[in-house]
Image: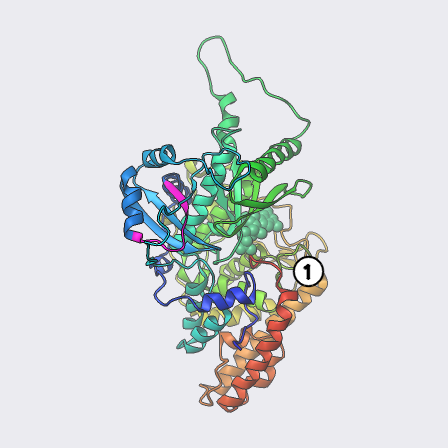
């Protein structure tokens, strides 16, 4: 039996993990992982959106010749880029050089005829390719992996790393979104935009949250924002002369009701007409109303919201922080992974710390270093120019958007030091009286008695971790202290020559208690691996109870 470590998000079942292990070697490596984006957020979003509009999604037969497939599609125009992936069937993402090629393909495509009782006619960019001659093709396509590494693989690569710094960078490399996965996310938004455009022709469906803020990991959910700004702004366009023309519109008592009505209708549309959207739930009474659904072909769990511009701005701010210094993402991924491994986070709403809050804690910590690794939000605001000025619902969301105008940090601390210091800092933080505030980058008095107070960077009177209760906070503090202790023990013991493989980050990710026995005492390699095996098996059997989510939140 294969061991399964209690690590990170566990998308799907053990069976899925096993399937992943069976993947042929040589899945596509894109090189994307080492690049730190330096483009402006808006620039990057516009480029990706434009790319997605020239792209189609095709469900392919299991046996297909890549060469013939590309030749067939090239009849409609040159292809810029393509890749295949597996998700309950074989899919291809094909990006044409020109948008017209998509129209040409749509014009040649027919509605399904056989075996369907009653099909709802819908011309989307999601196709089904069939072979006329079932037997003649050989499967010879290379697959792009869309799933996070299995726990077994992660365990191996972390153990084989050369240093704790190497472990943190390896973890980042294994989990971060690949170029292909990012493309698939933008394509999914673009497909949903086609549906929404039936009602709101000028709408834009934009991804936000971890899909775009540089902190997304394979398997995370896809947060989408239905942007109706263009439609809304139509009425504010100035006209010349004595007349002013306005659209006749329906009025409702509040913005919230307008949001609920729009999302309700779109939820119905996705449910009834949009191929591949299943399990549509309208969660309209939430603080931030949303429509949740699964996009089957991409495998993404999607949350569609509207009137949520501040969340998009938060994503832009995190994007900047993630892009400023290569240590930031490695540390955030590690802390999120550590929190997940110790069940400090969960996708089920409740008193858990969210990934968003954890990211804020890491950013805050990095602002407090001397010299700081990251600038405060106030200083990013000082660097802003007229173009960056942004007020949303009365909240000042102004900060510099051009990454090149922010001076690099002079801090040279290693990831190992930063990780140790992070645990030490929060293991001793005066949560009872102080709040965390990335605007000023220093501790402030708590304005209320919430156990954990992390100031919302833009709606500054709000606490983003209001949901966290005392016992979850205590658990976090206790685990941070334990992690400090584990890392200190490793320092005292020096390099491990006993063959104990659970060192460094692996020791931190193992369930609490397991470390006290394994760290600090030299044991034989065999005994240790036996112990880990037993432990892993017990985790595996608990896993279905503990990990019902698929997005690692
Ligand atoms: P994942 O756990 O990987 O999905 O991280 P995420 O950052 O995408 O978090 P999530 O899907 O929960 O939320 C999406 C986005 O909504 C976040 O990135 C934030 O911009 C915003 N958001 C989430 N929770 C809060 C909150 O409590 N307060 C505020 N102001 N914004 C939030
Ligand atoms: Mg998310």
In front of the other: 12 or 241 = 12
In front of the other: 244 or 411 = 244
Report the label total: 1
Question: In the rendered view, does 135 fall on the left or right side of 319?
Answer: left
Question: In the rendered view, does 22 fall on the left or right side of 95?
Answer: right
Q: Is residue 394 visible?
A: no
| Location of residue 536 by image quarter | bottom right
Please name the residue shown 44% across and 72% down the image.
Answer: 167
In front of the other: 113 or 507 = 113
Q: Is residue 10 visible?
A: yes
Direction top: furthest residue? 242
Residue 63 highlighted magenta (yes or no): yes
Please name the residue shown 52% across and 49% down the image.
Answer: 296
Instruction: Please provide percent x and percent y for residue 46.
Output: 39, 40
| Location of residue 361 by image quarter | bottom right
Check mark 1 vs ligand 1: CB closer than 8 Å? yes or no.
no
Where's the C terminus, which quadrant? Answer: bottom right
Instruction: Please provide percent x and percent y for residue 551.
Output: 55, 57
Question: Helix, strand, or loop for circle 1?
Answer: loop
Write down the residue under mark 1.
Answer: 433
- Specify few, some or many for label 1: CA neighbours under 10 Å numbering under 14, 14-19, or 20 or more: some
Q: Which residues are magenta?
A: 55-66
Instruction: Please provide percent x and percent y for residue 324.
Output: 41, 55
Instruction: Please provide percent x and percent y for residue 66.
Output: 31, 53
Q: Is residue 552 above or below residue 58?
A: below
Question: In the rendered view, does 6 fall on the left or right side of 159?
Answer: right
Question: In the rendered view, does 461 fall on the left or right side of 104?
Answer: right
Query: How does the figure colour the protein chain or chains?
Result: rainbow
């Amino acid at each position: 039996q294969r061991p399964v470590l209690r690590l990170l998000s566990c998308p799907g079942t053990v069976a899925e993990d096993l399937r992943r292990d069976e993947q042929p070697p040589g899945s596509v490596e894109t090189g994307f992982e080492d690049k730190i984006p330096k483009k402006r957020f808006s620039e990057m979003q516009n480029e990706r959106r434009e790319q997605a509009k020239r792209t189609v999604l095709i469900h392919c037969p299991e046996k297909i010749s890549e060469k013939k497939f590309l030749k067939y599609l090239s009849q409609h125009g040159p292809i810029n880029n393509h890749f295949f992936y597996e998700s309950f069937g074989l899919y291809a993402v094909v990006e044409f050089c020109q948008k017209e090629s998509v129209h040409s393909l749509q014009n040649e495509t027919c509605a399904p005829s056989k075996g369907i009782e009653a099909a709802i006619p819908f011309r989307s960019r999601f196709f089904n390719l069939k072979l006329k001659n079932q037997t003649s093709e050989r499967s010879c396509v290379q697959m792009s992996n869309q799933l996070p590494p299995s726990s077994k693989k992660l365990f191996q690569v972390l153990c084989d790393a050369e240093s704790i710094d190497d472990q943190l960078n390896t973890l980042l490399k294994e989990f971060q979104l690949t170029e292909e996965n990012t493309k698939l996310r933008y394509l999914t938004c673009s497909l949903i935009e086609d549906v929404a455009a039936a009602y709101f022709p000028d709408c834009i469906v934009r991804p936000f949250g971890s899909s775009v803020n540089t902190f997304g990991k394979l398997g995370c959910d896809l947060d989408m924002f239905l942007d109706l700004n263009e439609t809304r702004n139509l009425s504010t366009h100035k006209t010349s002369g004595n007349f002013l023309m306005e659209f006749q519109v329906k009025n409702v008592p509040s913005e919230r009701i307008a949001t609920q009505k729009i999302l309700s209708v779109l939820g119905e549309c996705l449910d009834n007409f949009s191929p591949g959207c299943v399990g549509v739930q309208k969660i309209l009474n939430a603080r931030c109303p949303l429509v949740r659904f699964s996009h089957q072909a991409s495998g993404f769990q999607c949350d569609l919201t509207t009137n949520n511009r501040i969340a998009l701005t938060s994503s832009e701010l995190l994007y900047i922080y993630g892009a400023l210094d290569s240590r930031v993402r490695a540390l955030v991924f590690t802390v999120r992974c550590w929190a997940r491994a110790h069940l400090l986070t969960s996708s089920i709403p409740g008193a858990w710390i969210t990934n968003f809050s954890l990211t804020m804690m890491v950013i805050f910590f990095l602002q407090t270093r001397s010299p700081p690794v990251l600038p405060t939000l106030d200083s990013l605001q000082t660097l802003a120019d007229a173009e960056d000025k942004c007020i949303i619902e009365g909240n000042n969301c102004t900060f510099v958007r051009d990454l090149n105008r922010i001076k690099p940090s002079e801090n040279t601390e290693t990831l190992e030091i930063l990780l140790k210091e992070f645990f030490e800092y929060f293991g001793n933080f005066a949560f009872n009286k102080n709040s965390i505030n990335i605007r000023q980058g220093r501790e402030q008095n708590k304005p209320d008695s919430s156990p954990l107070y992390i100031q919302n960077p833009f709606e500054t009177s709000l606490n983003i971790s209001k949901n966290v209760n005392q016992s979850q906070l205590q658990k976090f503090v206790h685990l941070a202290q334990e992690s400090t202790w584990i890392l200190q023990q490793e320092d005292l013991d020096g390099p491990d020559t006993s063959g104990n493989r659970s060192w460094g980050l692996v020791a931190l990710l193992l369930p609490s208690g397991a470390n006290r026995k394994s760290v600090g005492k030299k044991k034989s390699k065999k005994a240790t691996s036996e112990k880990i095996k037993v432990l892993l098996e017990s985790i595996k059997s608990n896993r279905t109870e503990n990990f019902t989510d698929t997005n690692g939140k």
